[in-house]
Image (cartoon, rainbow, N blue to C red):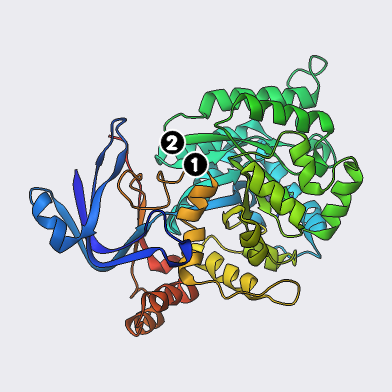
Amino acid sequence: MKAYRAALLYFKPEADPRQSVVYEPDGLLVVGPNASGTQVVLALGPYATLQADYAQLPVQHWPGRIIAPGFVDLHSHYPQTNVIASPADGLLPWLEDYTFPEENRFSACEYCAQAAQFFVAEMLRNGVTTALTFATSHPASVNALFVEAQAQHLRWMTGLCLMDRHAPSSLLNQPSQPGRVDATEQSLIDSEELLQRWHGVDRLGYAITPRFAPTSTDAQLRGAGELAAKYPSVWIQSHVAENKDEIAWARALFPASSSYLATYADFGLLRQRAVYAHCIHFDDADRTLMRDSGAAAAVCPTSNLFLASGFFDYASADRVGFKYGLANDVGGGTSFSPFHTMLAAYYVGREGRGKTGLSLSPQQLWWQHTAGAAQALGLEGVVGNLLPGCEADFVLLNPQATPLLARRTAQAATLDELLFSMIVLGDDRLVERTVISQAV
Ligand code: GUN
Ligand code: ZN
């Protein structure tokens, strides 16, 4: 067992996320192993109250610092680190001109390993401790990310990108023994093998990953849906309703479905633990489908602003009531920093010409990137919070990290002002340390 003394920031259970942040200016966080040997939170609260109960424990004291839950990111592409900052007219030319050529390089194991190491290090440096991440259509790219996440003891999810049409031929899933099974069948065999190798090992999880409906045949989507039914605890990740041209393409390819989102439902790919990136151009039938299926939206604001995809409609999402959380969507997204992502989400929320504009509270923004994102993944009470029982992944924030942060946070008269100062002015410098729950 071990204890940490600093300010504490976490979320009350069963509370309205808009108001549920608890800030304890001088707190104690006590961690120790659970029955399976993972370090979890055993107790937290005011130092003055808890200190006597844990007087024998070694205490790490971090004066002037804030302990907060590690950030949870719902959607990113580890093979797209080198694609950040590549402008294009829109999603489809961006995929064609920058993304597919870079993903092609992941046919080499060494390239995958090096990229996975850089990506995970960058996520951790920015305070992201759990993520649902795309790999490429090469099985080696999946293994490389799992190997790296396992080495760092992370709770992390990824899976083989399924694409059997409408992408450069070298990027389509490949048959391993030409003539025996076709590429589509092979992609499903490879997915199941990777799933059996990695899902539930340490803190790792497998995600069935059709890239998006336009790059899969009916047969591949059907097979993915069958895998999803056979393995209900695995995740599903894909993209939907990001861009108008993409939607027109998906509608033309799957005319029998009632909408682009409904295409996924028709193949059994909408359920709990299914996370769809973007979800921008939805109507209420789509929102109801999301709510009723238990699927969640990964809101990717820096990406949506950069690629001019559109603005996630928070008011309509809340009116219908489906799950969502935040994501950096590197490399369509422009930053690994959760602070940049939360600020961009604030701008997206404010946009009020094409939808209702809202001023999202800083508590709501922070929740979307921690406890709310964990809930979207079906990992509520596991990550994204510091309540007793949660795995002990946390960030140590230094509100004095820059002169401007120090000056502004010192003036914060309320919790909302303190949180907003960090969201608006924060970046990787605010994250002094990222602490991961170590197996014992
Ligand atoms: N839709 C299909 N693939 C992608 C991708 O790699 N990035 C984004 N932003 N959208 C996609
Ligand atoms: Zn994406």
Q: Assess disc 2: are there few (<14), some (14-19) or many (≥20) residues with their C-alpha within 10 Å of its C-alpha.
A: some
Nearer to the camera, 238 or 365: 365
Per the rendering, the mark at residue 156 is 1
Q: Is residue 405 left or right of residue 51?
A: right
Q: Amino acid at mark 2?
A: Arg
In the rendered image, the vertical position of residue 357 relative to residue 238, given as above or below:
below
Image coordinates for residue 199, horizontal then vertical, percent: 52, 29
The quadrant in which residue 245 appears is bottom right
- Closer to the chain start, of discs 2 and 1, is 1
Image coordinates for residue 144, horizontal then vertical, percent: 55, 36
Q: Is residue 122 among what the camera can see?
A: no
Is mark 2 in CB contact (under 8 Å) with mark 1? Answer: yes
Nearer to the camera, 85 or 384: 384
| Residue for point 78% across, 64% down | 88
Q: Is residue 410 among what the camera can see?
A: yes
Query: What residue is pinned by disc 2?
Result: 203
Question: Element type at marker 2?
Answer: loop
